[in-house]
Amino acid sequence: MDRKGIAFIAACIAGMLGLKYGLDWIWPTPPPGSRPVAAAVSGTNTPASVPTNGVPAAIPASSSSSTSTVAAASPVASPATFVAPSFQSAEATEVLENDSVRVTFTSHGGGVRLVELKKYPASVNCLDKDDPNRGLLAALNRFAPTPALTLGAGPLTGDGEFRLSRIPTGLRAEKSLAGGLVVFQDYSLSNGYFLNTTVTVENRGAVPFSLPGHDYVVASATPMDRHDKAEVQGAYWYNGSKAEQIAAPWFLNATFGCFGSNPRTEFVGGSSNVVWAAVHNQFFSLNATPDQSPAGVRVRDVSLPKPSAAELNADPGLNPSQHAFVTSFTYPASVLPPGGRLVRHHSVYAGPKEYRLLKDSENDIALVMDFTGINGICAKLLLSMLNALHGVIPSYGWSIVALTVLIKLAFWPLTNASTKSMKRMAALQPQMNEIKEKYKNDPAKVNQKTMEFMRENRINPMAGCLPLLLTFPVFIGFFFMLRTAIELRGESFLWCCDLSRPDTVFVIPGLGFLPVIGTPGVGLTLNLMPVLYLVSAWWLSSLTPPSPQMDPTQQKIMKYMPVFFGFMFYSYSAGLTLYWTTQNLMSILQTKITKAGEKGDKVVPVLPARRK
């Protein structure tokens, strides 16, 4: 490798290590006021026919219709703004619950304030005994700027004060507007994590009403807690053939993903082809499927209130800049005749991102797991195998170890043949060098004679690459699977109290400035599993002979590559580093077995002089 190549690799490594600090310099955090502040969501800009008090105005009688259907008009106006409603009365709440969820409804907007998941604690932090989330349940729409499953703040909700009442099937939130317009929504719980909603807009007056374009707020993608860095948080929408994710990178809008940016605050998509929309964080999701496709979907990036200086001083681990992605269905303006009713039904899933629960659901809502492409196929297969092993082995940690061993055994014949071929190539390298020297003035002849020599001595030049090409999708599949596997959340293994997070055993304060491995405001977290990975990777590299075709500089880079990956894996989940460490140990065992079986074997080359 020449000096330019070395400089390029060094620059790449330095760039990755300094990425966290480089981004802050290249694209600083937007100052307060550059993003919408957390508040309730206004559906659309109010049309001229709607007075400022938010009550739809009556249209001339000449435009009335004798039917009870709703006539569609122009598309939803865009962009929308955030308007903080001013509630005049205290908030009233009602609760519906089953064995899986507890849903809290609010009179402020007539929607869902919180969906608590009874089987999942809000915190599994075993180091911080004073964690304020300890004792709480995991929840969806927590910290959200607006209630979920509501028409939000706008012409169809007036002052936003709804009356909550019990009905035989569940709960009703109702609002009466001037002129005989009534808006109400009925909620009912199904089994498990499913609930149903029915939105009804009814014209009980004597004249037609012009209904403006409006939003129906599905929910907000919010952090799991105030410490959450929200690296896996966003919104999805599905058009029947493809699911599109809208997350922080889309709003960041940076060139090549990291350089400069022209940040965006609102996504608008769909064209009367929206099958469902969902919000999610690392482990939980809320998905709403309407019975009829809305005009489109809208996702807004909203800054959540920042922790105060006193809060940050007391708890430096708080995320100082959290966001919510408020996701809505958009509906066009329409005309509601006297006696007419607009009715929309929604089927809602609010629960864990557990593939076993989602894969058999209608409309492919399992796509929120992000299991797509060849990597997604591997992730689904690996997760199914992991759960099958857990049915026999009660520990998910040991199940990961067992699955890694089984995969390594499956690839054993291929890697064993590769190792032997590489060893033959190393032993026959002197004869190959003789060919290069003999025909050094004729490169085409060198290639011809070298290939003949390798073929006659049973050397496969692709043997070293083939195992890597076949195992790499498995590694990526493990990464996607373990990153969001709800099964690992709170699962302990040896000293790890949570396999879905780094296995921090203690924190060294004052070293949070260190790139990659430091946590600003907290310190240097000592994660033991990545250290074990680093030791096993170094050991494996010392046992694996370098390719004879690799120059000395490249050999040194490969030797120190485990250090680079050690930094990369340092803050990943303990489940992922457990898999990679186990894989290294299995590779070490295979290498030693292969070497033991080759003792006394002598490679006798087929020399060029003996070939016909």
Image: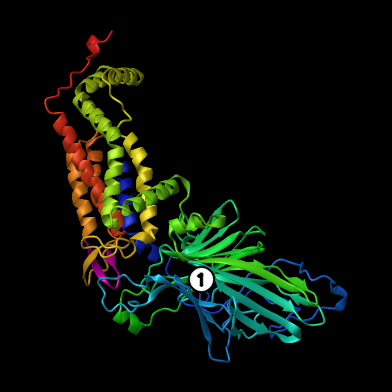
Residue 58, picture quadrant: bottom right
Label 1 neighbourhood size at 10 Å, few (<14), some (14-19), many (20+)? many
Q: Is residue 524 rendered magenta in the image?
A: yes
Front residue (pair 471, 189): 189
Residue most toward the left? 600
> In the rendered view, does 189 fall on the left or right side of 584?
right
Look at mark 1 in the image and give the residue it sits on. 220
Which residue is the extreme one toward the right?
Answer: 62
Give percent across and percent down for residue 111: 56, 77
Expressed as whole percent of the image width and height from the top left, the position of residue 525 reads 24, 66
Q: For numbered disc 1, what is the local secondary structure?
A: strand
Q: Is residue 379 above or below residue 294?
A: above
Viewer-proximal residue among 221 and 194: 194
- Quarter of the image for the N terminus: give it: top left
Mark yes or no: residue 569 visible. Answer: no
> In this view, which residue lies farthest toward the front?
168
Quadrant housing residue 504: bottom left
Q: Is residue 219 left or right of residue 485?
A: right
- Answer whether residue 478 is magenta in the image: no
